[in-house]
Amino acid sequence: MRKGFILFLLSCSILLANQSFAQNTDELMAQKEAKAKELAELEGQLGDLQGKVDALKGEVASLTDQLTPYPRWSTGLLGTVGLNVAGFSNWLSKDQPNTNATTIGLTAGAFANLQQEKYFWNNGGNLALSWLRFVDKDAPDTPDDPEFQIAADALNATSLFGYKLNDKLAISALGEVRTATQRGTFFNPGYLDIGAGATWTPIPNLVAVFHPLNYNFVFSNDDEVTYESSLGLKAVVDYSAKLTENIAWKSNLSTFFSYKDVNNFSNWTWVNTFSTAYKGIGIGLDIGLRGNKQESFNAFNSANPTNILSDIDNLDSKDNGIQAYYVLGLAYNLTSN
């Protein structure tokens, strides 16, 4: 009798538990459906509000544009200064325990852009300079150069004129100069691109230039080097953005594709600037990359006078690497609209 009573109690307990679980499940399902319905209604309202916000932003931008008088000039100056001084005295883990080393780097970029109702005129330039000096104090007879050695030297200037077909597309003409500046290297060699085509500005901080009619002039005062000018395609992309609230990025890619010999006479230069400037001052990083087979060919012949190559096609790929520089240091940014 006692055993039967226990089984009866267990059965009642299981039945009550199942009934309670079913009731809880029904209640939770009802709550879920109610919350889902409320969420759907709020999402619909949010979509409507976002559409109204975007429309108002467009209207404000249009009114601002109408109220801003022509001509519209915007100018700016930004750059980075890097300085590194190192001294070692009796530092025995080095092969040369007593040395002094100094590295100085400077990059600067400036722009002056004009906007008119029917046309625009954008002008800009970049300069990158770097010097280094190394002295081994234990070897006074070693022919250390008392002057700073040039580590980086590049000057780039552009002028772009465009006649607007609409807000995003223009017929354009571009002139671009690229050269070094120190110790007899100014326009030795130097590059001048002159061409025409189209410019596309899909957003305010992106400019894409596509000029299928462009002549790349190459100048040199050295009779022992060989450079070829040629007709080709010029493409330039310039972009600037804020990666975060305190980090700005500016990138410029300039390319030339030669119709005469795309493998040997083409060239490209890509410069990126990162800045944390706050109220004009901060930390900056500039990185420059370049590919130019004609420069690699002449540099190889200058470094190997007993093994001069007669044809640029004979240059090995390992001797035609990517040129690069970087400068990390104090950044400044001055902009006027």
Image: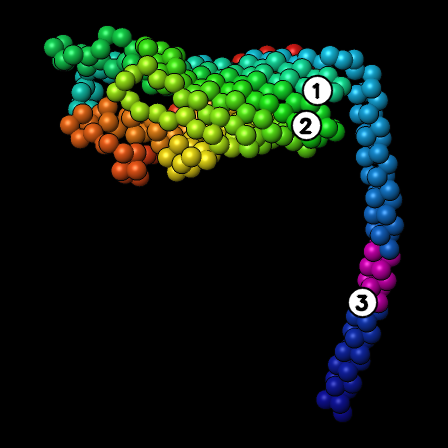
Answer yes or no: is residue 132 visible. no
Q: Where does residue 295 sit, x and y in percent of width and height? A: 34, 26
List the residue tagged with mark 2.
170
Q: Which of marks 3 and 1 is nearer the N terminus?
A: 3
Which SS class for mark 3? Answer: helix
Q: Is residue 33 magenta?
A: yes
Q: Name the residue under label 1.
A: 119
State the separation of the CA atoms marked 3 and 2.
65 Å
Q: Residue flagged by tag 2: what amino acid is it? A: Ala
Label 2: how many residues lie within 10 Å, few (<14), some (14-19) or many (20+)? many
Q: Between 182 and 23, which is closer to the camera in this rendering?
A: 182
For label 1, the SS is strand
Along the polypeptide, which appears first: circle 2 or circle 1? 1
Tell me whether the residue at label 2 lies in contact with that at label 1, contact meaning CB atoms closer than 8 angstroms.
Answer: yes
Q: Residues within 10 Å of mark 3 (few under 14, many from 20)?
A: few
Nearer-the-camera pick, 242 or 302: 302
At 27% from the left edge and 18% from the top edge, which residue is drawn?
223
- Residue 135 location, quadrant: top left
User: Quadrant of the image for the C terminus?
Assistant: top right
45 lies left or right of 119 = right
Residues rendered magenta in the picture: 25-36
In the rendered structure, which amino acid carries the disc numbered 3? Thr
Residue 313 shows in this picture: yes
Q: Name the residue under label 3.
A: 25
